[in-house]
Image (cartoon, rainbow, N blue to C red):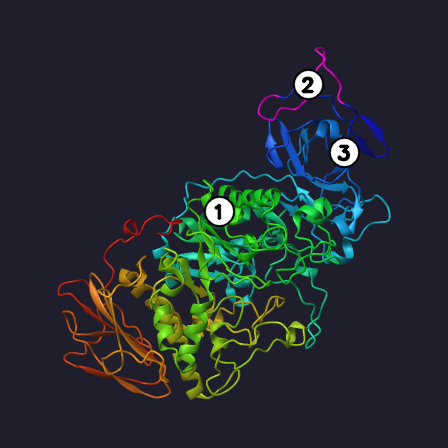
């Protein structure tokens, strides 16, 4: 190797005695390679040609192979560092296109002691913005396939601008991390969809509040400490908000009310798709986040709890033209992003850029990334943010049969994982009920809106409410799908918490510093007589009852229920319905509310237990006339479109008959009861009562005896049970085997 200054540049390959070029072969022992002189602590690193596949950095015989895609780059440089804080690299290796390029892939093989070291890339090429090319040889870039990253800048826009000299910007590094891990025979639970109860939460927000009482607040390991709570509650699956590495301090704005610097709390602006968020690992050495994340998954699996990741493949944290450059823009902007004919970024995401998901290269990267999280981290599924973008072509048009969505659904590695689509985007696509492919479950926003409006008392909502309760056949039956394609939710991270839904008539987002322009304006919420916190006992009683009504509806509905974390103990965001930038007490879980709202926590526990005890509520097929009868308050046909939202529903299960009564009208009413199946009706749920009478333990439900009519107060859900004589009152069977495979839809 010829030494140029402090950097190392490989010479042309030398020939061995037989006249063959020296070449690394990752599948076996490499040919002899000349030792490369090094500086610093990178001892005796040898450089070989390498292989073009697989992409990214992978260990091979006595070293690592690095392969990076860039079609339009004319020069690629690899920077090696001993530690993440170094400004100048220990070694700089220019790729010789004759040796280190195959097609559009730049590659090399490094042998030697490299584990724990760091690397980055620089790419040169045309700078023609109108054609989409914005190469800058001075920018330091992440490998798009990097499995671990360190030193992400505090504010991307200021620290990643082009440097006036060839020196790299400080801080941004990929790590050659140790991926070995002992899973200790802890296997994924593989829960069927019909058995799934999802709990959506945020790794940091779950335990960062001082009230959490954990030893690892805000960390992956802190999630483990809440496992007993999840088990007691009865949830089966955690859906974690983004853990793909992002830059929390990328928001250049302050809270206008307090002056506090705002941060990207949610994390929907990834910069390294394959790398777990380092900040959630606490004070560990770089790369320690891999073991921390895997430990979290292992212990959740050991407890029978699945892990679904909320993943972002529709855009990146690079934003629009004036945004920071971390990776994709600097390596091949014209390939990775959807661009307009004049080279501007098409924005179907509301975040400044849109990934060109159905380009074969980008499509392959996304599938590789999903496989990576399944194989390396054992995750059980994915929720795809703004998933309609994944069905757009390079012009931004929606494809009738998107190859990416088909490839994800049919990939042999991903066949058993759960796939959930947020079936819309910011470019006008709305595909709820007809998202391409039968394997995909969908966030059902129709469920959210119709259930909210029914319980708010909006006139004419009885028919829509019954449709959602029964599994949304209007959306899924026509495509040959099932109720299990519907992920039912009343609240999610995106919007009000459940407490705020019944406490605020409008959003209160001033703290976000966007002048109230952010967040949905139409939330179908109701403050029940006073806006925000109140000491009025009547208002508080009605709010609690409405929360119970909404939760009861969710867990009595066919489909897959999803709880927003903290709703079960009335977590509040003080009326903020878009707390994406609030990494503070607005978003954090205040665990003192668990004790303060113990009645509600118990109620949710009983609802989940009741759902488990009655498989008819979570069956994978739509109700037939033999399964269900819909009744009005007087026992006849319901007034589907009338002004008063009142409904009775008789559900016939194999072990018991259920009578579900809902009164969302602005006044009490009496319901004529159908004749019980065998034993007299017993009251299993009554939201007008306080604990424990709102949801008695199995076997303690009060009997109605020979009563043929019952009164319900305004805003009340009541569930009656009539069991066959001799049947046990609670769950006494294992239904897992009869419900089918975890990742399959019928």
Alpha carbon separation for disc pair 1 and 2: 44 Å
Q: Percent position (x, y) of residue 210?
A: 55, 66
- The mark nearer the N terminus, 1 or 3, is 3
- Which residue carries the number 3 mark? 93
- For the residue pair 409 and 185, the one nearer the viewer reads as 409
Q: How many marks?
A: 3
User: Over which residues does the magenta segment extend?
Assistant: 13-29
- Which residue carries the number 2 mark? 32
Lateral position of residue 588 relative to residue 11, left or right: left
- For the residue pair 124 and 335, the one nearer the viewer reads as 335
- Asked if residue 4 is positioned above or below residue 207 in the image, the reply reads above
- Which residue carries the number 1 mark? 406
Give the secondary structure at mark 3: strand
Give the secondary structure at mark 1: helix
User: Is residue 44 visible in the rendered structure shown here?
Assistant: no
Mark 1, Cα crowd under 10 Å, few <14 / some 14-19 / many 20+, is some
Mark 3, Cα crowd under 10 Å, few <14 / some 14-19 / many 20+, is some
- The mark nearer the N terminus, 3 or 2, is 2
Main structural element of the magenta stretch: helix, strand or loop?
A: loop
């Amino acid at each position: 190797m010829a030494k140029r200054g402090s950097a190392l540049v490989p010479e042309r390959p030398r020939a061995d005695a037989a006249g063959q070029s020296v070449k690394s072969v990752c599948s076996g022992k490499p040919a002899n390679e000349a030792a490369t002189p090094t500086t610093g602590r990178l001892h005796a690193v040898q450089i070989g040609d390498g292989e073009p596949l697989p992409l990214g950095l992978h260990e091979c015989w006595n070293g690592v192979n690095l392969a990076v895609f860039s079609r339009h780059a004319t020069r690629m440089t690899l920077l090696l560092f001993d530690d993440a804080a170094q400004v100048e690299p220990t070694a700089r290796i220019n790729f010789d296109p004759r040796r280190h390029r195959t097609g559009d892939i730049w590659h090399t093989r490094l042998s030697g002691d490299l584990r724990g070291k760091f690397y980055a890339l620089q790419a040169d090429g045309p700078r023609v913005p109108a054609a989409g090319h914005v190469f800058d040889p001075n920018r330091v870039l992440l490998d798009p396939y990097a499995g671990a990253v360190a030193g992400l800048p505090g504010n991307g826009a200021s620290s990643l601008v082009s440097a006036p000299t060839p020196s790299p910007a400080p801080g941004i590094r990929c790590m050659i991390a140790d991926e070995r891990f002992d899973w200790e025979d802890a296997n994924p639970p593989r829960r069927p969809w019909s058995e799934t109860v999802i709990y959506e939460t945020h790794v940091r927000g779950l335990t960062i509040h001082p009230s959490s009482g954990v030893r690892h607040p805000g960390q992956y390991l802190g999630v483990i400490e809440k496992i007993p709570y999840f088990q007691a509650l009865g949830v089966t699956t955690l859906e974690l908000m983004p853990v793909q590495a992002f830059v929390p301090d990328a928001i250049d704005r302050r809270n206008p009310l307090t002056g506090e610097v705002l941060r990207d709390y949610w994390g929907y602006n990834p910069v390294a798709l394959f790398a777990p968020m380092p900040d959630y690992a606490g004070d560990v050495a770089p790369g320690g986040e891999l073991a921390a994340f895997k430990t979290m998954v292992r212990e959740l699996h050991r407890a029978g709890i699945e892990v679904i990741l909320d993943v972002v493949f529709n855009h990146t944290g690079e934003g629009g033209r004036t945004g920071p450059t971390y990776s994709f823009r600097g390596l091949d902007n014209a390939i990775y992003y959807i661009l307009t004919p004049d080279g501007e970024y098409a924005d179907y995401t509301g975040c400044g850029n849109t990934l060109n998901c159905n380009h074969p290269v980008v499509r392959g990267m996304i599938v590789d990334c999903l496989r990576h999280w399944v194989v390396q981290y054992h995750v059980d599924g994915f929720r795809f943010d703004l998933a309609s973008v994944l069905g757009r072509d390079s012009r931004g048009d929606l494809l009738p049969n998107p190859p990416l969505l088909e490839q994800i659904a049919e990939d042999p590695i991903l066949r058993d994982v759960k796939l959930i689509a947020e079936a819309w985007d910011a470019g006008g696509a709305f595909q709820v009920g007809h998202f391409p492919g039968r394997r995909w479950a969908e966030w059902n926003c129709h469920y959210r809106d119709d259930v909210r409006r029914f319980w708010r008392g909006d006139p004419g909502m009885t028919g829509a409410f019954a449709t959602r309760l029964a599994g949304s056949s209007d959306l899924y039956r026509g495509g040959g799908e099932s109720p299990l394609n519907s992920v039912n939710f009343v609240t999610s991270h995106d919007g009000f918490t459940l407490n705020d839904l019944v406490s605020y008539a409008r959003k209160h987002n001033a703290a976000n510093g966007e002048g109230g322009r952010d967040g949905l304006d139409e939330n179908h919420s109701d403050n029940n007589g006073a806006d925000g916190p109140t000491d009025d006992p009547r208002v508080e009683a009605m709010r609690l009852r409405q929360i119970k009504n909404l939760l009861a509806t969710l867990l009595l509905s066919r489909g897959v229920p999803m709880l927003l974390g903290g709703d079960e103990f009335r977590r509040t965001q003080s009326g903020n319905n878009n707390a994406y930038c609030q990494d503070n007490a607005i978003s954090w879980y205040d665990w003192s509310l668990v004790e303060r709202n113990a009645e509600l926590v118990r109620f949710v526990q009983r609802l989940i237990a009741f759902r488990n005890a009655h498989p008819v509520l979570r069956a994978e097929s739509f109700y037939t006339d033999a399964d269900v009868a819909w009744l009005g308050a007087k026992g006849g046909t319901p007034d589907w479109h009338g002004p008063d939202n009142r409904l009775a529903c008789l559900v016939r299960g194999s072990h018991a008959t259920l009578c579900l009564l809902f009164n969302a009208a602005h006044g009490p009413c009496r319901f004529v009861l159908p004749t019980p199946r065998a034993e007299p009706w017993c009251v299993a749920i009554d939201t007008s009562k306080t604990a424990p009478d709102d949801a008695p333990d199995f076997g303690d439900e009060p009997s109605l005896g020979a009563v043929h009519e019952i009164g319900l107060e305004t805003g009340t859900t009541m569930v009656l049970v009539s069991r066959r004589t001799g049947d046990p009152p609670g769950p006494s069977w294992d239904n897992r085997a009869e419900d089918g495979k975890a990742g399959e839809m019928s």
